[in-house]
Amino acid sequence: MKTVSPFLELEDAPRVEVSFDGRTLSLPTGANLAASMLAAGIDVFRNTPVSGAPRAPFCMMGACFECLVDIDGITRQACMVEVTEGMLITPPHSAEVRHEPS
Amino acid sequence: MSRRDLVIIGAGPAGMAAAAQAADLGLSVTVLDEQPHAGGQIYRDVDRIAPIRGGILGPDFTHGTTLTAAMRHDAIVHLTGAVVWAIEDQFRISYTRGGRGAQIEADRILLATGALERPMPLPGWTLPGVMTAGAGQILLKQSGILARNAVLVGSGPLLYLIAAQMVRAGTPPVAMVETQSRGDVMRAAPHMGGALRGWRYLAKGLKMLAEITRARVPRYTDATGIAIEGDGKAEAVRFTSKGRSHRIACDTVFLHHGVVPNTQAARSLEVSHRWDAAQHCFVPLADEWGQTDKDGLFIAGDGAGIGGAKAAECAGKLAALEVAHQAGRLPLAERDRFAAAPRAKLESELAARPFLDAAYPPCAEALLPDDKTLICRCEEVTAGDIRGYAKLGCIGPNQTKAFGRAGMGPCQGRYCGLSVTVLLADATGQTADETGYYRIRPPIKPVTLGELAAMDDNTLDAAE
Ligand SMILES: Cc1cc2nc3c(=O)[nH]c(=O)nc-3n(C[C@H](O)[C@H](O)[C@H](O)COP(=O)(O)OP(=O)(O)OC[C@H]3O[C@@H](n4cnc5c(N)ncnc54)[C@H](O)[C@@H]3O)c2cc1C
Ligand code: FES
C-alpha cells in the first residue's frame, strides 16, 4: 500500500532512488532530504536514545537535531542535507552526538 | 590560513547588508553560512525561489534579491554550506564544509546568526507531526511542500504570515488556535503611538487577517489547556477557548509564539547577556554599532534582539561602518554621515515592536508548563524534574547539569535553555538575570572525527 503523506508537493522534479531503513524511496534530486522524506510519507525518522520515543523533524533549520539520520554511516541532520542518488539512510544507530559537562 | 578584515557568520539580511557595506568601504570580507544558498531565514534561497513562489511568499520575500545581488562583490567571499563550530582568540573561526574541517582568521567578527523559534513546550509537542511554524514555512519556501491538514497554534505576526502563505498556496490551515486574548490587545493599546509610526506593519497584519478570514479558516482565540494528542504521532489538538473545549483532528501541528535571539555563538564567546522583559528572552549586550563587550566582536540582526528583517539589514550596515572605522578605513565624521540614514530607518522599524510584543505575548502555559511536560526534548527532562532540582537547591541552569542531563543533548539547550531559566526563576523567586543561562562551550555545532581528520594539515599546525 502506498503511504499517503500528510504533505503535498507543489512541483515535480527529476527523482533518484535512496534507501531509508531498508525501504526504497524515490526523491527529487537536489531537494532538501528531510522535506522530501516527509513528503514521501516517512513520519518517524528516529527513536530517542533515552525512552525510544519516535521523533521527526521539528525545526527544519539545523537547530533541534530531531532529524538525525545516518547517511552512508555518518550521523547527519537530514534538514541540512540535499538528496543525492543512492544515499543509504538509516535511523541513527551510532551513539548520538552528546555534549558532555565541562 | 587566510586572514580577513571581517568574517561574518550568517548570510541573512544582517550579514548580507553588512558584507556589502564593508566591501564597498574596501574591506576584505568572508561570509560563512551553513545554508547552501544566501538569504538567511526570511530570504531563504531567495534567488532560486523568488521566480517560482514569489507570488505565494509576497514582496517582503522577493526584496531579498536586492541583498543577494549586493553580495556579489569582488571583495566578498561567501562560503556556502559552512557550519561554524568554534570561534577563538581574536579571531580564529573553525568550520566544516563539504565534510572537511577548515579554519579562517579575522581581525573582526560579526555574528549575524539570527533567531530561533521560542521553545513552546506543551503536552505532546515532541510527537512526530508537531513542528515549529517556521519549519512549516521552510518546507513551503525551500521545497514547495505543504501540510494538507495543519493546525496552527500560538500567537504573533509570523503565525498569521504563515497562515496567509498557506492560504495563497491553496492549502489553508484546518484551524488557528491562538493564545492571545482581547486583554493583551488592550494592554498593547498604550504602545499604539509607536505602532502608528510602524503603521505599515499593522496594515500588513490586517491584510493577512483578512486573507485568513476570507478563506474561512476557523480562529479560536484565548486558547488555554492546549495539548497535542496522538499515538506515536500528532492526531489532534485539544484546547479550551472562551469556556468551550474543542478537539480538532489534524496530521500536522505548527507551533509558534515568537522568535528569540540565537545566542549560541555569542554565549560561547562569553559575551554578557541581559534579560529583556518585553521580549521574554536573553539578549547580548552591545552598543549602538553592535559592538559587544569583547573587542572586535560585533552582533547584528535578530541575534542581537528581535527587530525583524528590515531592522536586521540596517543594523548590519551600522556594524559594518564601525568595523571599517576601527580598521582605519573610515574617518569618524564619514562613519556618522553614512550612519544617519540606516539609523533613522532602524528606529522607525523598531517603533512597532513594543506594540507587537505587548499584543502577542508568549503563551503563558508554554512558559511554565505542567510538571509532566517535556522541557528538554533531547534528554527527555520534564518541567517537574526541573522544579524538583530547584527544591533540592539548584539555582541556575548550569547546576541542572549536576542533577540530570537537561541541555546536554545534541541541541545544546537551543530548545530548552529559556524554559529552564524561566522555570528555575519561578521556583526560586530569583530574577532571570540572577538565574542565568547555560554555559555554552564549543563546539557549538557537532563536528565529526572524520571532518577533523580531513582538516588541512597546515591549518592544524597553525591551530596548535
Ligand atoms: C524559521 C524562521 C522563519 C522566519 N520567517 C520570517 C518571515 O517569513 N518573515 C519575517 O519577517 N521574519 C521571519 N523570521 C524572523 C527572522 O528571523 C528575521 O526577520 C530575519 O531573518 C533576521 O535576519 P538575520 O540576518 O538577523 O538572521 P537570519 O536571517 O536568521 O540569518 C542567520 C543565518 O545564520 C546562519 N547560521 C546560524 N548559526 C550558524 C553557524 N553556527 N554556522 C553557520 N551559519 C550559521 C543561518 O543558517 C542563517 O542563514 C523567521 C524566523 C525563523 C526562525
Ligand atoms: S529538523 Fe531540526 S535540526 Fe533538522
Image (spheres, rainbow, N blue to C red):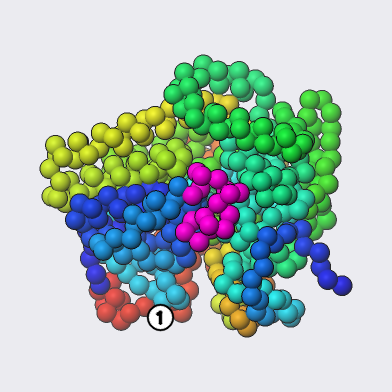
Image height of B101 relative to B354, above or below: below
What residue lies at 87% left-to-right and 72% top-to-bottom? A1
Image-quadrant location for residue B444? bottom left
Image height of B404 relative to B361, above or below: below
The quarter of the rendered structure image containing the N terminus of chain B is bottom left
Which range of residues does the magenta coloring cover?
Answer: B46-62
Instruction: Identify the residue position indicated by label 1 in the image.
Output: B453
Image-quadrant location for residue B418? top right
Residue B330: in sight, yes or no?
yes
What residue lies at 58% left-to-right and 19% top-to-bottom? B187
Residue B333 picture location, percent across and down: 14, 37
Query: Looking at this view, is B227 or B19 the one in front?
Result: B19
Badge 1 marks a residue whose secondary structure is helix
Residue B310 picture location, percent across and down: 42, 40
Say if the magenta span includes residue B55: yes
Query: Looking at this view, is B137 or B414 the one in front?
Result: B137
Image-quadrant location for residue A76? bottom right
Residue B324 picture location, percent across and down: 20, 49
What residue lies at 42% left-to-right and 31% top-to-bottom? B350
Query: Looking at this view, is B386 or B299 the one in front?
Result: B299
Image height of B204 relative to A65, above or below: above
Kind of residue indicated by mark 1: Ala
**Quick check: B243 left or right of B317?**
right
**Quick check: B339 left or right of B428?**
left
In terms of secondary structure, what is the magenta stretch mainly? Answer: helix
